[in-house]
């Protein structure tokens, strides 16, 4: 049962330590927002959602 939290930790580590500045060379994304901000907020939201689904009580 301890494998899932560790896998979530590794996913979050990969998402936030990945060199995202190399992935998004465009200065503006959709709605005029920088793609780096969109990536960080989407990654954060995904990690929070997965943590909620993983640790909620049935």
Image (cartoon, rainbow, N blue to C red):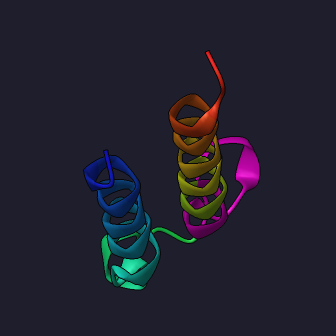
User: Is 51 left or right of 19, judged from the image as shown?
Assistant: right
Front one among 29 and 40:
40
Residue 12: in sight, yes or no? Answer: yes
Q: In which quadrant is the N terminus drawn? A: top left
Front one among 54 and 49:
54
Q: Quadrant of residue 39?
A: bottom right
Q: Is residue 31 covered in magenta? A: yes
User: Is 44 left or right of 33, judged from the image as shown?
Assistant: left
Work out whether 34 lies above or below 45. Answer: below
Q: Quadrant of residue 58?
A: top right
Which residue is at 57% across, 71% downward?
27
Work out whether 15 lies above or below 42. Answer: below
Which residue is at 32% across, 68% downward?
10
- Whole-percent x and y of residue 50? 52, 39
Q: Which residues are magenta?
A: 28-38
Which residue is at 33% across, 54% downward?
2
Q: Is residue 50 covered in magenta? A: no
Residue 25: in sight, yes or no? Answer: no
User: Is 33 left or right of 9, judged from the image as shown?
Assistant: right
- Whole-percent x and y of residue 57? 66, 25
User: Is 10 left or right of 17, judged from the image as shown?
Assistant: left
Predominant SS along the magenta part: helix
- Whole-percent x and y of residue 20? 40, 77
Work out whether 25 lies above or below 45. Answer: below
Task: Give the residue at the far top of this rendering.
Answer: 58
- Whole-percent x and y of residue 19? 34, 84
Q: Quadrant of residue 8?
A: bottom left
Number of on-image labels: 0
Front one among 49 and 2:
2
């Amino acid at each position: 049962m301890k494998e899932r939290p560790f896998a979530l930790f590794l996913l979050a580590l990969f998402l936030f330590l990945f060199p995202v500045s190399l992935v998004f060379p465009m200065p503006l994304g959709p709605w005029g927002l920088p793609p780096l901000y969109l990536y960080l907020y989407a990654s954060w939201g995904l990690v929070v959602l997965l943590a909620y689904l993983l640790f909620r009580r049935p």
